[in-house]
Amino acid sequence: MAAKIIVLGSVNGKLESAFQKLATLHQKQNFAFAIVTGDLFSLDQDDETISRLLNGDIKVPLSTYFTVGTVALPDRVVERVEKGEDVCENLHFLGKRSITKTSDGIRIVALGGVLDKTIVAGPSKEQHLPLHTADDAKILRGANSADILLTTCWPSKVWANSSKALKPEEQAAIASTDEIADLCATLKPRYHFSTSPAEFFYEREPFFHPPSPDSDQTPITRFISLAPFGNATKAKAMYAFNLVPGETPSSIPPGSTVYPFLPKTNLRKRPPPADDQANYSGHGHGGGRRVRRRRERSPPPGPDRCFFCLSNTNVDTHMICCIGDDSYVTTAKGPLPSTETFASSGLPFPGHQLIIPLPHEPTIRAMGEDANKTYSEMVRFKEAMQAMVATVSKFKLGAVTFEISRQSGIHVHWQFIPIPSDLIRKGLVEAGFKVEAENRQYPPFEEAALESGVDETSDFFRVWIWTDDSDTGIQSKELVMRFDSSLRFDLQFGRKVVAKLLGLEDRLYWQDVVQSVAEETQDVEKFKEAFKPWDFTT
């Protein structure tokens, strides 16, 4: 069923008149929800209006979503949304960087604020100031798809190949970035809404994206920028349209143009996720109730709910260490080693890291044409951390890195843990993994080089064992255990083996050794400082 949606340009503090107008239109049209682009509030918003809004004296007639524009949110509004509350009835803050699925099944990806070029690495740490980073945009590329993309900035060169000319003064006023263009190119939204910096409306002809090799569909995007609400020139400031969730275009609309963005070598063109995963979460306000039959398994969480997906607004961003084009590194929550475990070897932090691909897939193989590229960057992170651990410890430490690859998994990742070099040189690490597998009557390990695993048809566990003592050189081995879906494989197998090798059985379960945010943040900063000479993302 089609959802009827209305979008407003920047309201700039004209709350009462905007919501009165919206109420009149809603009474006639019965919209599913409304979206405000740009700024809902003004720079010098009067406190009386804020009080009337928060107290419910200014009525918001239907569910209305907004993000941050070019003006910071008023302090009293920030106080309310930081408590996890709506601003008032029907007024919902999307967050600056977010993915929301409405109760109608419409998927909205939002990135508010303008690009802050002074921050060279990492996502922005708060949701209310009108600035975002390049990594904020990169994180949202992991959302895979969107019905509606909402951004403050325009995508650079979106007017290319278009007959809809902008006046020179209009083009000069526009804040446009390559980061937003990359985001639009990756998500292929059906509608991309932005805000005009002056009193003009711009609607580009629809443009079609290059088709994916695994699909015969041709995604179509409509880019629309609305004039400010109540502008003096009466430029169009409201836009209504119908949208059917999940609908794909049956044909290219007349007048459509080719893709306006220059091709980028780092754009990921992965296949869209299966519908049951992409539409799993009722993440937004009013997400409908799920009815579960007896014995029916819940579908796996989609990117909105996956704690390895950076597009999940609940992800612990303070634990992120570095972000590449296709993967990122974070510290492990509840690390197996403690801060003191390797301190005598010169490593003043746990060193238990996760290498996580940006695509939300259960295996690297499932990433399709992105598999080899993503695997190569993950290996680059692994090798860089191996070199860091060996150098910082003066070659007292090596490392193990392990992966569980299962078709029934949720989001594949690698765990990296330092380990004393002498345990590796004596063969105790290899023996530890093999003996534990035998004790559990698992299939035997084989020495293999699977690389990205694109040719593997079975599930598998693999571990890389690596050390460099500077005298006899590097010793490295990849062990693989293949198994099928009938095996109830212990997802803590790798951690349990390493816990026994390090004598850390008391830290076996990560839930029992979760650190405070302050401790996690301190370990991240120590890791970043040590990793700086090897960090290829900066």
Image: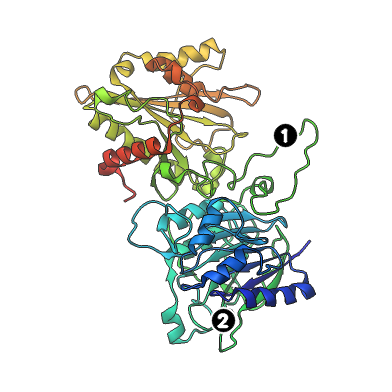
Identify which residue is drawn at 35% across, 62% down. 117
Residue linked to disc 2: 201
Identify which residue is drawn at 50% across, 47% down. 310
Q: Is residue 256 in view?
A: yes
Q: Nearer the viewer, residue 417 or 91?
A: 91
The amino acid on which the numbered mark 1 sits, given as a three-letter code, is Arg
Chain-order first, disc 1 or disc 2 = 2
Quarter of the view holding residue 430? top left
**Looking at this rendering, what residue extends furthest in the bottom direction?**
233
Q: Is residue 259 in view?
A: no
Mark number displayed over residue 276: none
Residue 214 percent coordinates (x, y): 61, 52
Q: Nearer the viewer, residue 214 or 537?
A: 537
Q: Is residue 84 left or right of residue 280?
A: left
Identify which residue is drawn at 56% across, 81% down. 201
In this view, 222 is above or below 478: below
Q: Nearer the viewer, residue 265 or 148?
A: 148
Quarter of the view holding residue 247? bottom right
Residue 138 percent coordinates (x, y): 46, 55
Residue 412 percent coordinates (x, y): 52, 37
Residue linked to disc 1: 297
In this view, 444 is above or below 337: above
Q: Is residue 448 left or right of residue 256?
A: left
Identify which residue is drawn at 47% across, 27% down. 462
What whole-number distance in Å separates the C-alpha atoms at marks 1 and 2? 48 Å
Residue 225 percent coordinates (x, y): 56, 75
The amino acid on which the numbered mark 2 sits, given as a three-letter code, is Phe
Badge 2 marks a residue whose secondary structure is loop
Q: Is residue 309 left or right of residue 346?
A: right
Residues at discs 1 and 2 in contact (Cβ within 8 Å): no
In this view, 43 is above or below 528: below
In this view, 236 is above or below 182: below
